[in-house]
Image: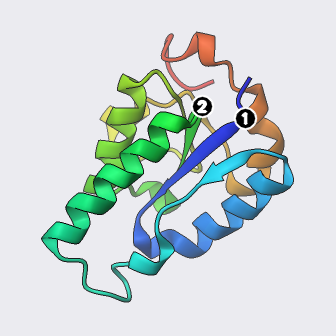
Amino acid sequence: MISSVTICSSSKFYDTARRAEEILRKAGLTVYTPRYDYSEEQVRVGESDKIRLTREFLDKIARSDAVFVIANGGYAGASVCIEVGYAVGQGKAVVFSEEPAEFALRALADAVVPVDEIGDAVRRIDRDAHHSGGPA
């Protein structure tokens, strides 16, 4: 059963990520999020910060049962693609808020669930069926 989720999101979608965080917390899940204070929309993130933040975030994924990818308009940036690959390598369930535009990411999705429906749906994702043939 999924009890903890890491939200993966481009900084341009942090408003949506915060909404998903609220919904998931209300559903009783432990939620790990990006560092909203390092939004590249508002601050310059240098190389050393990016390296540190990436390593911290991968640790959050390692502690989670699943990742929920905010993919507004199907978009997932380079960092989110790395995070999804890491999550798959760690055997985590991967759920997207919208179908990803990138075909390779579609191959890694266990489910596509809109943000407003994620609270109830995330517990129904079958981690044992993980990557057994596409989205649920």
> Percent position (x, y) of residue 108?
42, 28
Q: Is residue 85 above or below residue 69?
A: above
Q: Is residue 90 above or below residue 20?
A: above
Q: Is residue 21 above or below residue 119?
A: below
**Residue occupying image coordinates x 32% and y 46%:** 81
The amino acid type found where label 2 is placed reads Asp
Is 135 placed left or right of 49 in the picture?
right
Please give the residue where the numbered disc 2 appears in the rendered image. 65
Front in this rendered view, residue 99 or 80 = 80
Q: Quadrant of the C terminus?
A: top right
Task: Give the colour scheme of this rendering.
Answer: rainbow
Which comes sooner in the sequence, label 2 or label 1? 1
Regarding mark 2 in the picture, which secondary structure is present there?
loop
**Residue occupying image coordinates x 48% and y 17%:** 131
Cβ–Cβ under 8 Å for marks 2 and 1: yes
> Percent position (x, y) of residue 75?
40, 58
Q: Quadrant of the N terminus?
A: top right
Q: Residues within 10 Å of mark 2 (few under 14, many from 20)?
A: many
Is 113 placed left or right of 8 in the picture?
right
Q: Residues within 10 Å of mark 1 (few under 14, many from 20)?
A: some
User: What is the CA distance from the residue labelled 2 to the residue labelled 1?
Assistant: 7 Å
Q: Is residue 68 visible?
A: yes
> Percent position (x, y) of residue 4?
66, 39
Please give the residue where the numbered disc 1 appears in the rendered image. 3
Regarding mark 1 in the picture, which secondary structure is present there?
loop
